[in-house]
Image (cartoon, grey):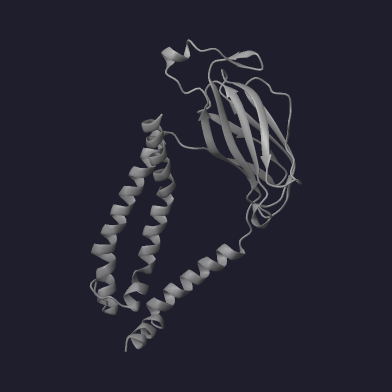
């Protein structure tokens, strides 16, 4: 009896609509051509001298026998998110005016990959990469490590070429993390209210599925909202990890 009611719902106008909609979205995702975009994803931002100011002023730090005040390092992974090879890549990583770039070095996933740098110009580092294959399926990535003296909280990555552009994903600050978490919580509350007061009564009126029914057809009926709730939580999950991680570092710093 249960299987007949499920089949009846699937072959109804409502079930057919959901199936057609999901199939259309999946077909679009699978067949669309990804734009050629070079992604610079920040994975770590380290203050190598994390000491209270009154103590730090009494410590002398040098880099190649030159004094350093605020030694810090940015680590970013560079990869090709598109579907075609990107060649002759030139990227400029530009920090604030008072920040000085000391050194740039790389880590590669493959011996075929290569990264070189032009002479350092004060607050800028120029990175050259002959080519990068698409991350899928080639898994080509280069990790760039940029050692600086000064503030590394704000910087930009400049670069583009024929048929491609660059996009930077940097680790957000605490204020941005809290803002994203508040947005996630508000969205989850709104979605839960819509589910309880509008969608579930709609399902009960049209298909006779009550909110206390436990069956395959009730699961199918709530899948769209479960997908939306899951997508919202996954969107905010990375900010939750960053928030927990920053709180742990403060407590153990």
Q: Residue at x 61, y 65 (%)?
A: 31
Front in this rendered view, residue 200 or 229: 229
Front in this rendered view, residue 235 or 252: 252
Q: Position of residue 240 (x, y in %)?
A: 39, 45
Q: Position of residue 39 (x, y in %)?
A: 61, 44
- Asked if 1 appears above or below 129 in the picture, the reply is below
Q: Position of residue 51 (x, y in %)?
A: 45, 20
- Asked if 27 appears above or below 187 in the picture, the reply is below
Front in this rendered view, residue 20 or 151: 151
Q: Quadrant of residue 3?
A: bottom left
Q: Residue at x 36, y 81 (%)?
A: 9
Quadrant the N terminus occupies: bottom left
Q: Residue at x 68, y 49 (%)?
A: 140
- Asked if 69 appears above or below 112 in the picture, the reply is above
Q: How many marks?
A: 0
Left or right: residue 52 compared with residue 191: right
Quadrant the C terminus occupies: top left
Left or right: residue 162 compared with residue 144: right
Q: Position of residue 214 (x, y in %)?
A: 28, 75
Front in this rendered view, residue 142 or 20: 142
């Amino acid at each position: 009896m249960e299987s007949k009611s499920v089949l009846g719902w699937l072959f109804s106008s409502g079930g057919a609509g959901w199936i057609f909609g999901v199939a259309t979205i999946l077909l679009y995702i699978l067949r669309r051509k990804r734009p050629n975009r070079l992604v610079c994803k920040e994975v770590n931002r380290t203050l190598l001298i994390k000491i209270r100011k009154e103590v730090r002023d009494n410590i002398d730090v040098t880099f190649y026998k030159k004094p350093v005040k605020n030694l810090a390092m940015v680590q970013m992974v560079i990869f090709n998110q598109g579907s075609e090879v990107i060649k002759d890549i030139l990227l400029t990583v530009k920090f604030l005016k008072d920040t000085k770039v000391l050194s740039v070095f790389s880590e590669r996933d493959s011996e075929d990959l290569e990264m070189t740098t032009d002479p350092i110009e004060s607050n800028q580092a120029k990175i050259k990469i002959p080519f990068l294959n698409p991350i899928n399926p080639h898994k080509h990535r280069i990790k760039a490590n940029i050692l600086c003296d000064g503030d590394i909280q704000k910087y930009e990555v400049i670069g583009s070429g024929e048929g491609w552009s660059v996009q930077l994903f940097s680790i957000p600050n605490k204020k941005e993390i809290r803002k994203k978490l508040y947005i996630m919580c508000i969205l989850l509350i709104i979605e839960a209210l819509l589910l309880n007061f509008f969608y579930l009564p709609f399902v009960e009126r049209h298909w006779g599925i009550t909110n206390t029914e436990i069956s395959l057809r009730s699961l199918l009926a709530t899948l769209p909202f479960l997908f939306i709730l899951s997508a919202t939580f996954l969107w905010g999950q990375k900010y939750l990890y960053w928030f927990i991680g920053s709180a742990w570092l403060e407590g153990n710093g």
